[in-house]
Amino acid sequence: MHEPRITRGDVYPPPPGATGTAEYARELIGELEKLVNLQVFESVPKRVNWKAFDAVIYQIANNPHHAAFYERALDHPGIAVLHEVNLHDLIKGQTLNRGGERAYLNEVMYEVFGQDIGDPDRGGLFDVPQPRTFTMLRRLLDHSERCIVHSGYAERGLRAKGFRKPVAAIPHGSSVRSLDARPYRKALGVEPNAPLIGLFGYQRPDKRELECFRTFERLLGSYPSAHLLIAGEPHPEVPVKEWILQSGLERQVHMLGFQKMEDYDGCLAACDIILNLRHPTFGETSGTMMRAFGLAKTVIVSDAGASRELPDDVCIRIPPDGYEKTVLVECMKWLLESPSRMEEIGSRAQQWVGDRCTWPKVAGMYAAFAKAAADGVEANLHRPRSSAPDAGATGNPGLTPEAIGAYLRRWIDPAVESADYFRTHSLRLAHTLQRVPLGGAEDRVLEMGCYLQITPALRNLLGYGEVRGAYLGNSGEVVKGSVVATDGEAFECFIDLFNAELNPFPYQDEYFSTVLCCELLEHLEHDPMHMMSEIYRILKPGGVLLLTTPNIASLRAIGQVLRGAHPASFRRYTRIKPGGRAEPGHSREYTPDEIRLLLADSGFIVLSVETGPYGETALEDPRWVLPVLENLNRPTALRGDCIFAAGRRESLPRKRFPVWLYGE
């Protein structure tokens, strides 16, 4: 093939608004232009023949500076490079910060429902603004042909939004270098043997600046000659100057603003330890961390997100939990008591950069991915290794409904009664598994209402190390469920018995990465928020809840009402058969908006609320209801039979008895 002609859309805000993404682009361009016929746009051109290019690459950061190229990427789809799995700040800056509350709400609803709803009244049900942890990405993904990210964690975040097109997980680039740090230490007034701890970059709250500052104060008890360097633009929510004055540490805490890259690197080289914590994380790979690795510096990172994919021997990882400050200060003391430890860790980090992440290597991966895009084929790029897949992931894009259905049918005996249930729920089961996060050996998943129909797939297709089931029964009892596939493969797991709306769940706090609550909510008679509270408790921070339930506002339900029948899908009382027990009917069915409220009031960030079919049915096709709704000027979106919802556990305010569900 001819050398691909590629355009890149890059934004270079002038200092002091220069972004890490702009510096990333500068480094990349220097190598990429050696491999392809490259044309770079630093601002959106008024006139350009986009068809003249084999590929168009957009650098998109979560920053209003990138709004113009975000809009261009929507109009002319190409390859979107995402440096974190969130564009909330960018979209908020485009809309809400300019007084466009309606436009902001439209974007929020698109993120949740996956389509433009066109229903202004529905927007009033959403908080304005949404929490910063509410990820906004879906519209760009729906208008992109391919994506580039820097980690498997970030790729799984894209898949969680339903992106099924090619994704390249290309590591963040860096350069192997050595710099003379002495002039920078001297300029700061730091003695050659005095410990210097560094905090770098824009001082956002999620970089744990306060925790790092308080930890440094504790470190002074063991190392009174230590200094702290804080280099980067200040953030209005992070009052570093106030902390310094209140602590009386003006001589030992050095606060620098925006630095030219030459001085930025010199300051990095001057430090003994770099603190690079993140919580919450959106899958970003820190450019500062990568520059520090290239300089053979020791970096302490949070054991979360993309950092979990780093090799174990190139950095120090600490959990972002209640013991964070204690663990951090002990780590720093352990490192400082033996400089050879820091040298060894830094040397391994630098070697890893040389082996994996130099800019020529990164540019080669970009060129290969762009060539694959031009040729219309997949690119076989090396995937980053993951020490522990994160719960914020998603299902395998290769798991199509057809492939999942074929796998599940292996576990169903067509002669037994459960085969009828499988046929009527086959599409729901397949779509549910597509939405389940990928797991790893260390991840645990709970399936509530376990029928052992999709349960084997949680381990065999999605990779969970521990699969647990739950079912209605006498609290405290545990049974072993087992099933054998038609080809002889066996599966078994423990199933805990309890009442989900009355009993405490028999699991430790923060035990599961993922919980499936499918076709259970509608059966609850007394206290659904008890179940939601317990699910929140047993999920890890960032863990995902997948919930399915019938849609009381579906076309089929509306059609039932118009015919004078009951709208609920399973509304009959059931009789106990000899030797058996009654299967509970549906006590309450929900609308998509109510499910969104249920998740939000339970402390979850709502990832998605969508509707779709259940499976084979002999019921009448309800699409005759559509023109009725259109004539009445009522919304036609979200009218499928089944609601599919996903939420991520966050530290958000919760309501134990929301008025919309329990009344005053």
Image (cartoon, grey):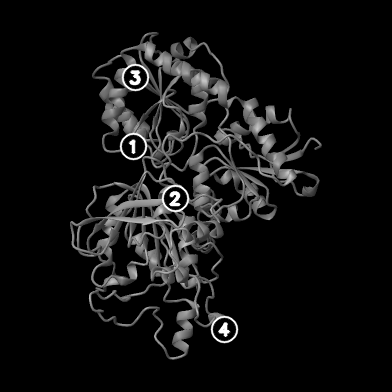
To which quarter of the image does residue 16 belong? top right
Counting residues from the N terminus, which is met first, the one under dot 3 or under dot 1? 3
- Amino acid type of disc 3? Gln
**Mark 1: secondary structure:** loop
- Amino acid type of disc 1? Pro
Q: Distance between the residues labelled 3 and 4?
A: 74 Å
Residue position marked by numbered label 1 in the rendering? 320
To which quarter of the image does residue 369 belong? top right
**Mark 4: secondary structure:** helix
Q: Residues within 10 Å of mark 2 (few under 14, many from 20)?
A: many
**Mark 2: secondary structure:** loop
Q: Residue 63, position in %: x, y? A: 54, 44
Counting residues from the N terminus, which is met first, the one under dot 4 or under dot 1? 1
Can you tell which mark lies on residue 624?
4
Find out whether the residues at labels 3 and 2 contact each other: C-beta distance under 8 Å. no
Q: From this viewpoint, which residue is outermost toward the bottom?
A: 564
Counting residues from the N terminus, which is met first, the one under dot 3 or under dot 4? 3
Find out whether the residues at labels 2 and 4 contact each other: C-beta distance under 8 Å. no
**Mark 3: secondary structure:** loop
Counting residues from the N terminus, which is met first, the one under dot 2 or under dot 4? 2
Quadrant of the drawing holding the C terminus: bottom left
Residue position marked by numbered label 3 in the rendering? 252
Q: Residue 32, position in %: x, y? A: 70, 31
Q: Distance between the residues labelled 3 and 2?
A: 46 Å
Find out whether the residues at labels 3 and 1 contact each other: C-beta distance under 8 Å. no
Q: Distance between the residues labelled 2 and 1?
A: 21 Å
Residue in view at x 37 percent, y 43 percent: 465
Q: How far apart are marks 3 and 1 (CA)?
A: 26 Å
> Quick one: 336 or 309, which is closer to the camera?
309
Q: How far apart are marks 2 and 4 (CA)?
A: 36 Å
Can you tell which mark lies on residue 437?
2
Q: Residues within 10 Å of mark 3 (few under 14, many from 20)?
A: some
